[in-house]
Structures are given as structure tokens and as C-alpha cells.
Amino acid sequence: MNVLFCGDSGVYKGMFLSLISLCDNTARPIDAFILTADVGNRKAISDTFADELQTAAREHNENCNIHLLNITEQFKNYLPLANMGTRFTPLCMLRLFADMIPQIPDKILYLDTDIICRKNWNGLYDTDISDFEIAGVPDRYGRWFFSNPLKHNYLNSGVLLLNMKKIRKSGLFLKCRRLCRDKKMFMPDQTALNKLSVKKKLPRRYNEQGKIKSDTVLKHFTTFFKYFPYIRAVTIKPWDEERLHSELKIYEFDKLLDEYNQRRITK
């Protein structure tokens, strides 16, 4: 199974937790592709970290292979200039360059690094998307702000099953890169993908953005709203162990956190 992660050296812990959790929940071989780049003061993921990650992953799944791909030059040609001053992190857009990288296979599962797998995910990966460019789960809040509430078809881009063969043929990612470069948008790459793609909705269990349920396969630690005693946005990531316990009452990922803390991961 093919998995895609993106980011810079600041996502080491999240990427470790996410990949190890994937390895723990399938016996099938995994090829993990990592797109990275140097942009401004953001440093690309190092070869040393990729090697350490592969060593750790193979202790959980002996057939896990890491492929680190530095695409700094390609990224510089399509900097999201219209959105560089927003809250959006430019390196999130690295996934939109996957069509330019020949090593990326025809089908791949993209994951944000704040996602933890808690059940077997073979069913997700095996979903038939031959007639679609992307498949994902509707965004928790997107139905109220970005789409028709009745259709609820605005997808959260943290978990995306990608039909790269179709994407390369249609030029979807090229269109998205151009839109992110030229037009200011809220959550630019997610908005571009929803606007331009032929997409399929997946069951909520494959990208749970709220409370963990008994059938949750992938838990996504997105920003959410609290309404008492006042409305506010709250962001708690899976590596924030103290708040994970005190505010979310989540303890089931402690073993993963302990393993990361016990390893001397290169920074």
C-alpha cells in the first residue's frame, strides 16, 4: 500500500506517530513517500530522519519502505504567492506536486501528519476510485461554510485517496497549483481541490474529525470549536500529550508517544 506524507523538519513527531500507527494496523507492505522542501526558514526533512523512521517502522511492519523526495526546485516555481500571508502553511501544498514526481505510484493515500490510525485500514485503501480523481470524508464544518448543507460534499483534505493516473491525465494538480498561486483563498489547497476535482465521498470512520467512535479507523486532530463559556477555536495535536489527557481524555495513543520519547530521533 502506498502512503504520501508532506512537510518540513517541524513535522517529525507527527509523521512518526502517524506512520507507526499505520504499520501497527496492517500486515500488508507499505511504501511511504515523503515530499519535502526548503522554503525560507523552513528546513527540509533530512535523510537521517528518514532512515531513523524506516528503522522504527520496520520494527512494526518489516515490509515498510521510506522514499524521501526533496522537491524544493519544483515548489519554488509555483509558490502560493496569493496565500503566503495567510494562516495557511505553504508546505501543505507539497501534495499538489505529486503529479510531477515519477516515483509516485498510480494510487496513493495522502495523510496529514496529525492523523493517527487505530484500526485496520485495508478497506480504505482498497476503495475503488477508478472513476474519480480523489476520495475523502466531508469536512466537519465545511458543510455550513463552504458547500450546500444538504449535499455535504466539501471534503476535508487531511485524508485523501488519490487516483494519480487520472490526476496526471486531467491536470488537476496543475490547475490547483495555479489557483493557489494566483487567488487568495481560505485553506487554499483544500478549497482548490474541492472546487476543481471529480471526487467521491468516503465514510466518516476514515477521517474522524470529532470524538473517537467505536468504528473510527483514522482519527484526525483538527481544530474544533468550543461554545462555553464563549466561542473559541481549539487545536490539540496528537503529540501534545498533556492536553490530550487533560482536555480530550484520550489515552489510547500513549504507547506510540512513549516509543517516540524513548527514541533519540534526530532533530
Image (tube, rainbow, N blue to C red):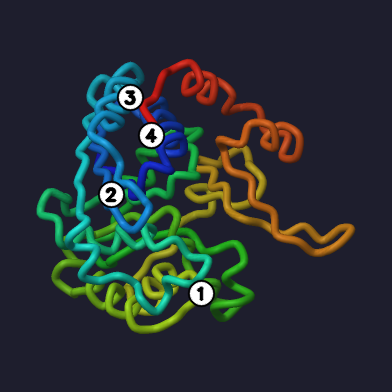
Tag 4–tag 1 contact (CB < 8 Å): no
Mark count: 4
Real-space CA distance between mark 3 and mark 2, rounded to the nearest whole angstrom: 19 Å
> Given this view, does label 4 or label 1 mark the residue nearer the observer?
1
Counting residues from the start of the chain, the first of labels 2 and 4 encountered is: 4
Left or right position of 202 against 198: right
Residue 57's disc number: 3
The quarter of the image holding the C terminus is top left
Real-space CA distance between mark 1 and mark 3, rounded to the nearest whole angstrom: 35 Å
Give me the residue at 28% from left, 66% from top.
133
Tag 1–tag 3 contact (CB < 8 Å): no
Front position in the image: 112 or 85: 85
Give me the residue at 67% from left, 57% from top.
224
Real-space CA distance between mark 2 and mark 1, rounded to the nearest whole angstrom: 23 Å
Q: Which residue corresponds to mark 4?
A: 19
Front position in the image: 164 or 226: 226
Q: Which residue corresponds to mark 2?
A: 36
Mark 1: which amino acid? Phe
Tag 4–tag 3 contact (CB < 8 Å): yes
Front position in the image: 84 or 163: 84
Give me the residue at 51% from left, 24% from top.
256
